Image (cartoon, helix red, strand yellow):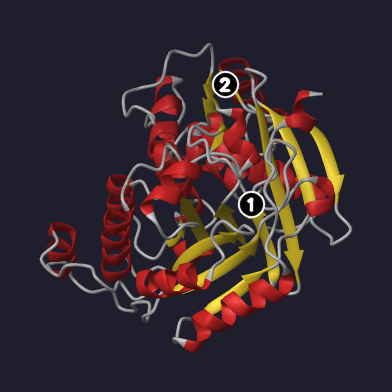
Amino acid sequence: MVEQPLTEEAPQQKHRLLDLSMERLAEEFTALGEPAFRAKQVFDWLHVKNVHEPAQMTNLPAALREKLAEKFDHAPLRQVVRLDSRDGSIKYAFLTRGNDPIESVVMPSKYGCTLCISSQSGCPMACKFCETGHMGLRSWLSAGEILQQLYLAEQDSGQTVDRIVFMGMGEPLLNLRALRRVVEILCGEQGRNWSPRRITVSTVGIVQPMLKLADTFPRVNLALSLHFTTEAKRREQMPEATHDIMELMAALYYYRRVNGGKVSIEYTLISGSNDSDDDARRLVDFARFKGLPQDHPVVLDAEMQEKPARMQPLPVHVNLISYNPIPSAGFRGTSEDRIDHFAQLLASKGVPVTVRRSRGQDVGAACGQLGGKFAEK
């Protein structure tokens, strides 16, 4: 398990416009001999107006448009596939400049439109029940490659996305630098000016980046992909998720106590593997932070921080997900009756629970099914 290094990336032939913060873009324009306000105009074209071809940035002088086209890479991704599900969701496959596959899913609803977005091509976490985990890690995505998934999906679908969930390919907290830049741009006043609550970061539980995210971006939502309630089973099925359950509990406690964003536990039900009554009881204890020592260093650190204006109530909300079949694994999903029984066990102990119905299963777009195969054809 390797985190993206925080040093500068390897030199590229051209800088990607979408990778650049407002401040860095202004520096580039100064180097070009252009006034700072031109950088603000370009930033607005890119992130608010969703226009990325310099030739279409009509309030720029023609000479500057030519400079931008020559000096910068303005479109690092190429859309190769669109698959429409019967339920209205849309799966997109993209290729990076290095021909690494990425997939994203647009999910319209009567409440708005959510984009399930990828932070890596493939994933190094090797979870056995996830198609992306069977790919291995192909590449880390830059901030621009993450953002362009959003912008291309909006352009092609005609939808206005109003929230994103980092639940596509990859472990976002291993790509923390790019994640930070994406949040800064989407939530910045000169970008889309989103509330951080529109962004949910899902993680298998990488403890130090969880704590960093809690401190850096107040009110960004966190979803912990727990899936198993015993150390042995979790390490067997999620071999690269190396933090023990008590460490995960402490990190989740810290995030809830310090950040102010919504916190949830994601739990995929797999028949005969993690859907017993004992699993439900252990999940209740986890959601209540039962057994977490109050003298744990992370807990003590959390108690020293200023409380957020609004803190998630206890117990932590649990989202139950029916396992979606993948060709590379022989698991079976838990029956509907058993899912309902499991949910009732949680609810009877006061744990708020939602049975999350996956969308896009007919086009391989449901939770755990993104595998890059369409993009490779």
* 25 shown above or below 147: above
Front label number (1 vs 2):
1
Crowd around label 2: few <14 · some 14–19 · many ≥20 (10 Å): some
**Residue 116 tag number:** 1
Counting residues from the N terminus, which is met first, the one under dot 1 or under dot 2? 2
- The answer to the question of whether label 1 and label 2 lie on touching residues, with beta carbons closer than 8 A, is no
Tally the numbered discs: 2
What is the number of the mark on residue 72? 2
Where residue 372 appears, as percent x and y from the top left, is 70, 32
Q: Quadrant of residue 2?
A: top left
Q: Residue 72's spot in the image, x, y percent?
A: 57, 21
Q: Is residue 196 left or right of residue 355?
A: left
| Image position of 110 with respect to 350: above or below | above
> In which quadrant will I find the C terminus?
top right
Q: Which secondary structure, mark 1?
A: strand
Helix, strand or loop status at disc 2: strand
For the N terminus, give its image quadrant: top left
Q: Residue flagged by tag 2: what amino acid is it?
A: Phe
